[in-house]
Structure formats: structure tokens, C-alpha cells
Amino acid sequence: MNVEGRKIQVRAWRYNITSKEGSSVPVYLLDTDLPENSAWDRTLTHFLYGGDQYYRFCQEIVLGIGGVRMLRALGYENIRRFHMNEGHASLLTLELLDEAALKANKKQFTHEEVEVVRKQCIFTTHTPVVAGHDQFPLDMVEKVLQRKEIFDMKEVFCCEGILNTTFLALNLSHYINGVAKRHGEITRLMFAKYSIDSITNGVHAATWVSPSFMELFDRHIPGWREDNFSLRSALSIPKSEIWEAHFTQKKTLIEYVNQVTNEGLDFDVLTLGFARRSATYKRGGLLFHDIKKLKELVSKAGPIQVIYAGKAHPQDQPGKDVIKYIFKIKEQLKQSIKIVYLENYDIELAKKMTSGVDIWLNTPQTPMEASGTSGMKAALNGVPMLSIPDGWWIEGCIEEITGWAFGKPQINGTTTDESDANDLYEKLEKVVIPTFYDRDRFINVMRHCISLNGSFFNAQRMVQQYVTKAYFR
Ligand SMILES: *Cc1c(COP(=O)(O)O)cnc(C)c1O
């Protein structure tokens, strides 16, 4: 590949993802750390989200242009569809345009080639904030790619003086979607010129269902792994068995927590879980907005304990401060509410937490949660969510049936920490805590969680929708 006149060599590592039925999907991981490359170019595949704009742009050339060339070199001649997630890979459209021009014996691609490429491409955006979309100054882009004339083509490169990779992907895709219905609406407001659909995210059921629920589903709903829709019949599993499976997972989690933290969490106390990347918009500290009110409601309605986990991005100081704040509150509340913050949140810990707590808490600032997925992992294990209605929860929440929503938008449509926290306290005191300590009512919610949400917000349904709405269109 040519970058500013230098040649960069790329190799690929193949990772095969195999299914129990024996099919296999190759994943190619690109690597520039080769002796043929300069010392600096060798580092291009070392860091995700590292370096400056120049470094990132070079990475996107490796991914987009290098990616297509790697696939061709590996013998993939007839790829029907290219699916871009975020703008990071959208330079692949440039390579496809060049390929199409070459095929048509043209020196330079034209509107005809744009139409050819558009039929091949699909774009999914995941970010409801403008700042989350990559932009590069056009003089740098021209210097690095060493071509100028193409950027006059407004139909492809729409923006003055910058290359916005999101617009590049939007302009060259025939199907565009957000990752939940609400996120689709937000995306249409951001990019009004384009036709934008939505496909709501889903999680992989066989990965996220915990051992005790696997055993339960295998007994009552054989074939649930091959057909996740069949989880709808979880409604007919006896309540006692649902609770038993849940309590097994809860016991595993609490024993683990007590072993690593020595905090002595209780097996019978309502346990809230909150774990995700510590970004400020997730508002990890919202539960503690008014400590006095929180203490009062707990003493009236019944005890709670809270398990936290999640790391901040290394360069996100405000995100790190949220974690510090929760540590401070944990000391202050020692006498009334047990709080733990677990280290090293990863998929293994996420499995333990999403299946082992009683209720999954989510407190994002709307409309920042494009979808959210951890609540879906919880739903598959009969753990209901208590969340701001944002992302997938707008579709997933049926009040007091699959969980609970809180937070009242103000007249201008926005919410404040103050009003959201007050609404959270009221919901906890009047509805959520009483429901938990009335076991029969709570298990009713758990069952609906699995049969209405576990059966739907999974990767199987999601991929089927991509196939019918995007890939075969
Ligand atoms: C599921 C998961 C996330 C994402 O959680 P959200 O609710 O979508 O923010 C982050 N980290 C780990 C380890 C996870 O398993």
C-alpha cells in the first residue's frame, strides 16, 4: 500500500470462529509489524485509539484500502456485500471505486462507479454524538493518499476542507442503519439527507446464558440455542425453578465478591448491578445524587447492596473521576448500604455479574446510549433492568412486566441529574424494592424478561434482520 509515497506491507492473521454445528467464519486481523516496513509503520497496528490524527488516518488506510487488497490477495473475488461499522473502515469504498473504474477501463471513477459501489456497501453507525465521527483535514488526506482530483467529487466527498469518514460511508452505502429504534431517529436528525433505518442490537444467547439457566432451558426448552425465539416459552417454566436457577448464580457471584473484597455481601439482600465502560454520560454516580434521600428510602422500603465494575478509557479523566467518586461514597454509606467496585471488568466478570445480581441498573444521559447491551445479557438470565428509557430499553421495557424505566424528560425534552435521581428514588421505594421482596411478583417479572426480551434481543434475531433488510437488498 502507498502512504505518502512509502510502501507499507501488511500481513493477516486468521482467527476461525467455529460453531458447534461445525461451520466456521474466518476473521482476518491485519498486522504491519513486519521487517519490510519502517520502524514507525511497524507500530501502525499496535494501538487502538492511540496516536494523533496522522497515525489514525494511516491506520484507516491499512484497514480500509489494505483490508480490501488483503481479501483480494486471499482469493475473495466475488464479495457481495461490504458492511462498515462506523466510519473507520470507510476508505474501503475508495478502493472499490478504483477497482470499478479499472474494470470499466477508466482512468478515474465517475458517477457510474459510485452507483456500482453503493450497491455493494452497507453502513452501520453506533455513535449519537457528532464528535464521535472521524474527521481529517483534507490537505493531510491529499498529501498522504497522493491524489487530489477525486476530492472535487462532491457526491462522494461532501465536505469542505475535511474528510469526514462517516459521510464517505453514508454517501457510498445503499443501506444505512442505527443500532436501536431511538438511535435510528437520532441518526436521522443528525444526517437528515439520508434514508436511515434501524436494526436493534442483540447479544449471543449461548454465550451469555449462565450455567444454571442453560441447564434449566435445556430441560424445558430443548433447541433454544438453535432457535432463540423459542425462549418465549420460558413463561411456562415453574416459578420455583426460575428462582432456584437465579439463586445459584447469585450465590456464585456473592461468594466471588466476598472472596475478592472481603465486604461480606448478603445473599438475601436485593443486589443491584452496574457495570460498563466508565464514561461520564453513563452517570455511574447517579444513584448517589442525594445520599440522604437514598438512605431514607432504603430504611423504609428494604435493604439494597450494589456491585459496580468498569474501567475508564486511559485518556478519559472525567470517566476515572466517576470511579473515584463511587469509592468515596462507598466509605460514606458503609453503615447503611454495602457497595463494592470490582476490578478488571471483562467478559468473564460480565457473565458473573449480569447473571448474579437481582436487578441491572442503567443511568445514561439521553440520548447518548445508542443501544446498550449489558441489560440484554441480564434479560437472558431473568435479571430485569431498571433504566432510563434510552437505547434498546425504549423497546425492551414494559413497565412492571420486563423491568422498570425512570427519568422524566423536562419540557424541553432533556433530563437533569436532579430530576432523574428523584424519579429513580421514587421508583425504587414505591415499586422496585417492594416487588423484589414480594418474591412471587418478582419472579413474574423475571420470567417475562426471558420470554419477551431474551427471546428477541439476541444476536440470532439481529443477524436475521441484517440478512433480510441489508445484505439481500
Ligand atoms: C457487554 C459489555 C460491555 C457493554 O455494556 P453496555 O451496557 O453496552 O455499555 C462492556 N464491557 C464488557 C466486558 C461487556 O461484557
Image (spheres, rainbow, N blue to C red):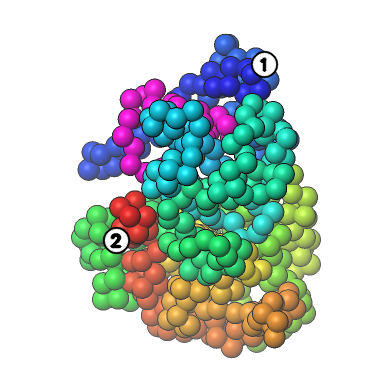
Q: Is residue 148 above or below residue 424?
A: above
The kind of secondary structure the magenta stretch mainly shows is helix
Residue in the picture at 45% in, 80% down: 398
Q: Identify which residue is drawn at 43% across, 55% down.
A: 175
Q: Quadrant of the C terminus?
A: bottom left
Whether residue 74 is situated above or below residue 402 in the rendered picture: above
Q: Residue furthest top?
A: 36
| Secondary structure type for disc 2 | helix
Please give the residue where the numbered disc 2 appears in the rendered image: 228
Q: The residue tagged with tag 1: helix, strand or loop?
A: helix
- Give the CA distance from mark 1 to mark 2: 49 Å
Ligand 1 placement by image quarter: bottom right
Q: Quadrant of the N terminus?
A: top right
Residue located 55% across and 46% down the image = 156
Q: Position of residue 203 (x, y in %)?
A: 42, 56
Of circles 1 and 2, the one toward us is 1
